[in-house]
């Protein structure tokens, strides 16, 4: 796992996922030995590369080794030579080239490195069916080597909210991929309506983006209505979910979207861009209703229009809240995630070991 997996100042869905599956695999009978590798993944320095090389070399022949994709995918020169000797599995949270803001040549370079790594290992675990389809097509991987273990969630008491409409919550690291710029621009377009928006998430990933966002908030006259809270402890974040009326997530790319299911676990409906695995995370209630509004990412008018609908249509809000409570009742927990992951790993344990 990346060295910052337990860093409270840099929370991420990938870190939460890694930590929870380590715990829950142990709970269902697996022996789990954890290794963290400090470094600026996926662009590690020499010390980080040496540390990863040493950890892999220390594993006995035939060992089953699960590696976070941010660690594995950018260094095929380290991973591929071990792929014959070890039963290597890579867990992909986000394809490296899908990160927003990359120069085209760098994205292509990361794509090539990732492709070489994923083609060499025994299996690839992803967090949504959308991600499985994406990697199969993009890297030309055999579908039977891809396994889905979607993130679980802890079901929480149903949120009380405020007045049922005005408290907006965005939970995402403040980065270009998460799209807070366009969220603020959309909110400026409905400034005549009564709302406040709290943005919870790390502020250290891209300081230039954060600085520009603060400037945009100020220039839009929203300084008293949009607050960047930074990362929050789990208990404090849960309190904000409980007080929220609507989760807003305006990402440009997501393989799943754990903030979505966390909101739904509190019965909070969602307004999100229909990108990647986000529609899969939003899902449906048992009656088939959708517990949120999904908007086209490429349409700049869609977000403000959806926000205005949320405020102007009480019946829509009632339907979405009912659907969110229905979806809450059928969300899977983390033990289900661990069992799906264990199924992929179990299959590899019974494969004949390759001969180097």
Image (cartoon, rainbow, N blue to C red):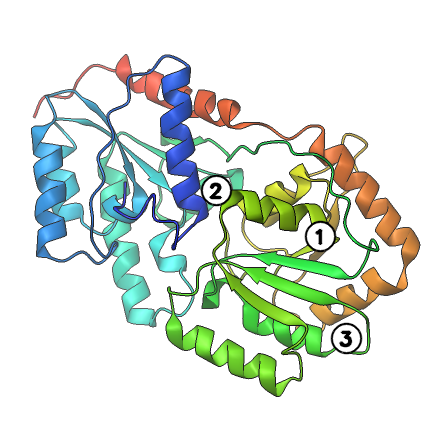
Q: Earlier in the sequence, mark 2 or mark 1?
A: 2
Q: Is residue 47 above or below residue 219?
A: above
- What separation in Å lies between label 2 and label 3 (alpha carbons)? 37 Å
Element under label 2? helix
Q: Position of residue 330 (x, y in %)?
A: 69, 28
Element under label 3? loop
Q: Image check: 297 left or right of 47? A: right
Q: Position of residue 293 (x, y in %)?
A: 74, 54
Q: Give the residue at mark 3.
A: 190
- What quarter of the picture does the N terminus occupy? top left
Q: Earlier in the sequence, mark 1 or mark 3?
A: 3
Q: Residue at x 13, y 34 (%)?
A: 56
- What separation in Å lies between label 2 and label 1 (alpha carbons)? 33 Å
Q: Residue at x 81, y 44 (%)?
A: 321
Q: Position of residue 182 (x, y in %)?
A: 60, 72
Which label was assigned to residue 133?
2
Q: Residue at x 34, y 16 (%)?
A: 346
Disc 3: CA contacts within 10 A as few (<14), some (14-19) or many (>=20): some
Q: Image check: 267 left or right of 215? A: right
Q: Is residue 299 above or below residue 125?
A: below
Q: Is residue 108 above or below residue 31?
A: below
Q: Give the residue at mark 1.
A: 244
Residue 306, image quadrant: bottom right
| In the foreground, 64 or 276 | 64
């Amino acid at each position: 796992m990346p060295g910052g997996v337990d860093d409270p100042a840099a929370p991420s869905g990938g870190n939460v996922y890694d930590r929870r599956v380590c715990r829950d695999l142990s709970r269902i009978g697996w022996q789990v030995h954890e290794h963290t590798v400090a470094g600026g993944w996926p662009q590690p320095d020499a010390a980080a590369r040496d540390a990863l090389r040493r950890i892999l070399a220390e594993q006995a022949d035939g060992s089953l080794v699960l590696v976070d994709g941010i660690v594995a995918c950018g260094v095929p020169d380290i991973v591929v030579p071990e792929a014959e000797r070890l039963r290597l599995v890579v867990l992909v949270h986000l394809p490296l080239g899908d990160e927003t803001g990359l120069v085209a040549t760098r994205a292509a370079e990361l794509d090539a490195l990732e492709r070489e790594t994923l083609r060499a290992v025994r299996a690839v675990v992803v967090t949504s069916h959308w991600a499985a389809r994406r990697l199969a097509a993009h890297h030309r991987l055999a579908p039977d080597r891809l396994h889905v273990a979607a993130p679980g969630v802890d079901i929480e008491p149903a949120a009380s909210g405020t007045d049922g409409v005005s408290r907006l919550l965005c939970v995402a690291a403040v980065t270009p991929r998460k799209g807070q710029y366009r969220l603020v621009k959309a909110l400026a377009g409905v400034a005549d309506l009564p709302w406040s928006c709290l943005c919870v998430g790390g502020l250290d990933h891209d300081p230039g983006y954060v600085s520009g966002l603060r400037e945009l908030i100020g220039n839009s006259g929203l300084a008293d209505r949009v607050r960047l809270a930074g990362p929050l402890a789990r208990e404090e974040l849960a309190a904000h979910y409980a007080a929220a009326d609507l989760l807003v997530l305006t990402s440009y790319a997501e393989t799943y979207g754990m903030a979505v299911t966390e909101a739904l676990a509190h019965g909070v409906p969602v307004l999100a861009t229909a990108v990647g695995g986000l529609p899969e995370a939003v899902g449906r209630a048992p009656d088939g209703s959708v517990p949120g509004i999904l908007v086209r990412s490429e349409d700049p008018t869609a977000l403000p229009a959806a926000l205005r609908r949320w405020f102007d249509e009480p019946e829509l809000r009632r339907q979405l809240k009912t659907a969110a409570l229905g979806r809450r009742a059928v969300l899977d927990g983390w033990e289900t995630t661990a069992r799906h992951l264990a199924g992929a790993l179990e299959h590899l344990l019974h494969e004949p070991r390759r001969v180097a």
